[in-house]
Amino acid sequence: LAEDEGADYPLATPALKHNFYVDDFIGGANSVDEARKLRQQLSELLSKGGFELRKWTSNCLEVLTGVPAEHIGTQSSLQFVPNETVKTLGIAWKPELDVLCFESSPAMETTNVTMRAILSNIA
C-alpha cells in the first residue's frame, strides 16, 4: 500500500513502513500540526486499502480534534485521567506523562515457597 499509493502521503508512507507492528501503530511528531497531518495522511492512505484506523490515543488532546468519537481509544482519551495507562504491544503507556512502563503482578504471597507454588504463580 505504501509503495502503490504512498507518493501523495510524505508523512504517512515512512510511518506505515516502519511504525506498525501487526495492527498497532506507535509514532510521534515534532509538533501538534505535524501530528495532525500524520494522523490525517495515515487515515487517508490506509482507507485506500480498505483499512480504518481506530483506538486513537495521544498525549496531546489537540491531535485528536476531528477524530470521530467511535475511533477514539477510550473516552478518557478525550481528557487526561491521572495514572491511566493504554496497553499496546505488551507495554503500558501513560499518555498524561508520555512514558512507557511495564506492569507486573505482585510477588507470591504464600509463606510456604515450593516448586509447585512457584510454577503455579508464573503460569
Image: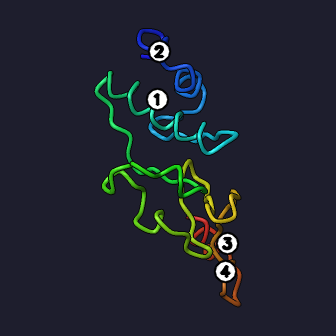
Q: How is the image coloured?
A: rainbow
Query: Residue 39, position in %: x, y?
Result: 49, 38
For label 1, the crowd category at 10 Å Cα-Cα, with few meaning under 14, some 14 to 19 and many 20 or more, is many
Tell me the number on the disc at residue 41: 1
Q: Earlier in the sequence, mark 4 or mark 2?
A: 2
Question: Which residue in the protein does label 4 denote?
Answer: 108
Label 2 near label 4: C-beta < 8 Å? no
Query: Residue 72, position in %: x, y?
Result: 40, 55
Question: Which residue in the protein does label 3 denote?
Answer: 115
What amino acid type is highlighted by mark number 2?
Asp
Q: CA distance from mark 4 to mark 2?
A: 55 Å
Q: CA distance from mark 3 to mark 1?
A: 54 Å
The quadrant of the image that shows the C terminus is bottom right
The tally of labels here is: 4
For label 4, the crowd category at 10 Å Cα-Cα, with few meaning under 14, some 14 to 19 and many 20 or more, is few
Question: Which residue in the protein does label 2 denote?
Answer: 8
Q: Earlier in the sequence, mark 3 or mark 2?
A: 2
